[in-house]
Amino acid sequence: MIEFSVAGEPISQGSKRVVPAGGKPGGRPHTIESNEKRLRPWRSVLADAAREQAMFHGIVPAPTPVRLQMEFVLRRPQAVPKGRRGWPTTKPDLDKLIRAVQDSLRAVLYEDDSQVVAYGNTRKVYALDGWTGVRIRLEEVK
């Protein structure tokens, strides 16, 4: 089992759009994330943190089933009173936040997303102390 935190604003991965190659009509189309400019740096930070954990714990991706638990800590809007946790019922969607993390950990802590057979207490909450990011816990399922 490993646990680690990654600071930053959690970015969701979800909606894709189709664009022609080279931005020209008639080119071979390909898909890109709708928020690629923000998502790419976030996924890079996640992957770097996972690689650091893999090196520290001597983890080599293996085809074993794993349980993944995540807590996304989002910036608290001013409308939510200080000192109250509150629940973020607005975007970003939890499933899209999960997708960004899962894809970032692939080939670093496990071989493929299909190995995630269970989620622990995965949730999104508002920050109480100003820290935003994600807390990740990964363990092998036996």
Image: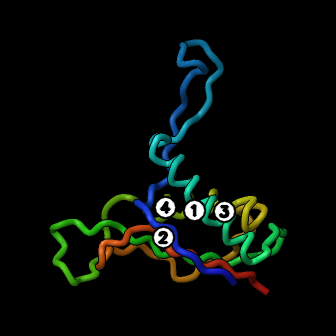
Question: Along the horizontal axis of the image, is 126 left or right of 111?
Answer: left
- Disc ID at residue 101: 1
Could you say where residue 116 lies in the image, as x and y percent from the top left?
69, 71
Question: Along the horizontal axis of the image, is 100 left or right of 7?
Answer: right
Q: Amino acid at mark 2?
A: Val
State whether residue 87 appears in this view.
Answer: no
Q: Label 1: state its secondary structure.
A: helix
Quarter of the view holding residue 79: bottom left
Quarter of the view holding residue 83: bottom left
Q: How many angstroms separate mark 1 from mark 3 (CA)?
A: 6 Å
- Disc ID at residue 14: none
Q: In the picture shown, does residue 135 fall above or below 22?
A: below
Q: Amino acid at mark 4?
A: Leu
Q: How many angstroms separate mark 4 from mark 3 (CA)?
A: 13 Å
Labels 1 and 3 touching (C-beta < 8 A):
yes
Q: How many angstroms separate mark 2 from mark 4 (CA)?
A: 10 Å
Quarter of the view holding residue 29: top right
Q: How many angstroms separate mark 3 from mark 2 (CA)?
A: 13 Å
Could you say where residue 32 lies in the image, as x and y percent from the top left?
55, 36
Q: Nearer the viewer, mark 4 or mark 3?
A: 3
Viewer-side residue, 60 vs 70: 60
Seen at 69% across and 64% down, the residue is 51
Q: Which residue is mark 2?
A: 134
State whether residue 52 appears in this view.
Answer: yes
Labels 1 and 2 touching (C-beta < 8 A):
yes
**Sequence-wise, which precedes: disc 1 or disc 2?**
1
Q: Which residue is mark 4?
A: 97
**Sequence-wise, which precedes: disc 3 or disc 2?**
3
